Image (spheres, rainbow, N blue to C red):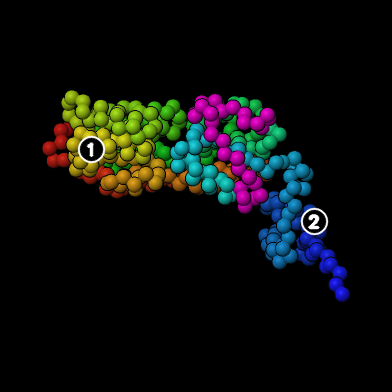
């Protein structure tokens, strides 16, 4: 004799949570939707959350999305997929998105920092918002035209029409580099600058020159290179082999350029850091793969992505995004040391 099939256990509803917690369904909706502050007491909110947890309640995201007219999808626009920094930004954004039942679509702008085309027939029908990292707001006009909220990461504070912004303290990072090298005794610098036309690299250059121009006996030149190891090597080699007093420190906009600078020094028979100090920026995995390991500025890329996604969620819920820039940190390693005793002064 076979037993009758057992009915599947029913999934607890918001009404069940409300009944067990002794509150209304509206209160449950406010608390579990994160909109309870100022409307529900802390004690009641905690009771609702605890009851939902005990019952194993999970919100019906599909129904909620239909009710709110949302797709629960964000677009993350980056200049390129080849840079580790943007992969880490995506990791942080996706982690926060997953906690809130959202997905993140990663989209590299077809023209780098240039205009980003709408990747869908109409972004407004496919997305709830756009997050863009290290790009100009003007490059996103095609997406902004869809009427979607735009959150900018590592971008120009002067750009308007932005729903929220998450920036790193880039200028302070370059000031930390300058202070470190000055304390070691360096006075003759060359800035190996990225040829990419973006706010973040312009901010690095301004901060470095501002930090050095007020120190007596100091000089700083600038050479530009495409953002790859080969271009960095060629530009650094040309600079180091030029007539006249040789710089004692190469300050690079990026760890990739710094790796190229180290290759240039070796090709010219110079030792890093005994003859030449080299610094990078970003603290990519490459920074500890070269020998000597790079002195560089660590950027909390995952936290940038986390804050960016949190800011978009806040905008969608009509809440203010968390203000303030994220701090960065100089990591001193083996590629920087005092200049050689016979180094020419500026």
Toward the viewer: 214 or 68?
68
Residue on which disc 1 sits? 266
Helix, strand or loop under label 1 = helix
For image coordinates 84% across by 67% down, the residue present is: 5
Q: In which quarter of the image is the C terminus?
A: top left
Q: Quadrant of the N terminus?
A: bottom right
| Mark toward the start of the polypeptide (2 vs 1) | 2
Toward the viewer: 122 or 345?
122
Q: Position of residue 298 (x, y in %)?
A: 39, 46
Q: Does the magenta stretch include residue 20?
A: no
Q: Which mark lies nearer to you, 2 or 1?
A: 1
The secondary structure making up most of the magenta span is: loop
Badge 2: how crowded within 10 Å, few (<14), some, or many (20+)?
some
Residue on which disc 2 sits? 25
Q: Are marks 2 and 1 in contact (CB under 8 Å)?
A: no
Q: Give the range drawn in magenta.
A: 97-123
Q: Position of residue 320 (x, y in %)?
A: 61, 43
Is residue 147 in view?
no
For image coordinates 49% across by 47% down, the residue present is: 302
Toward the viewer: 7 or 294?
7
């Amino acid at each position: 004799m076979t037993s009758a099939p057992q009915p599947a256990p029913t999934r607890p509803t918001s009404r069940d949570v409300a009944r067990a917690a002794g509150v209304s369904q509206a209160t449950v909706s406010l608390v579990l939707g994160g909109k309870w502050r100022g409307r529900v007491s802390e004690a009641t909110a905690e009771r609702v959350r605890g009851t939902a947890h005990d019952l194993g309640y999970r919100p019906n995201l599909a129904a909620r999305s239909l009710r709110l007219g949302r797709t629960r999808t964000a677009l993350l626009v980056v200049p390129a997929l080849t840079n580790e920094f943007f992969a880490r930004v995506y990791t942080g954004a996706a982690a926060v998105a997953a906690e809130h039942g959202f997905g993140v679509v990663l989209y590299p702008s077809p023209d780098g920092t240039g205009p980003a085309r709408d990747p869908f027939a109409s972004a407004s029908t496919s997305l709830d918002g756009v997050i863009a990292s290290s790009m100009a707001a003007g490059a996103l006009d095609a997406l902004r035209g869809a009427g979607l909220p735009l959150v900018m990461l590592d971008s120009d504070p002067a750009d308007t029409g932005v729903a929220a912004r998450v920036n790193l303290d880039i200028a302070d990072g370059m000031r930390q580099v300058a202070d470190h090298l000055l304390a070691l005794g360096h006075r003759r610098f060359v800035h190996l600058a990225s040829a990419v036309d973006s706010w973040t690299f312009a901010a690095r250059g301004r901060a470095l020159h501002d930090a050095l121009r007020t120190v007596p006996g100091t000089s700083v030149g600038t050479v530009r290179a495409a953002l790859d190891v080969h271009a960095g090597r060629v530009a650094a080699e040309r600079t180091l082999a030029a007539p006249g007093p040789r710089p004692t420190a190469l300050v690079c906009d990026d760890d990739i350029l710094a790796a190229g600078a180290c290759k240039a020094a070796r090709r010219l028979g110079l030792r890093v850091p005994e003859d030449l100090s080299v610094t990078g920026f970003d603290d990519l995995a490459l920074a500890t793969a070269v020998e000597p390991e790079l002195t560089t500025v660590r950027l909390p890329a995952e936290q940038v992505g986390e804050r960016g996604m949190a800011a978009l969620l806040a905008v969608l819920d009509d809440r203010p995004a968390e203000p303030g820039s994220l701090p960065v940190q100089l990591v001193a390693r083996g590629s920087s040391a005092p200049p050689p005793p016979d180094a020419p002064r500026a």
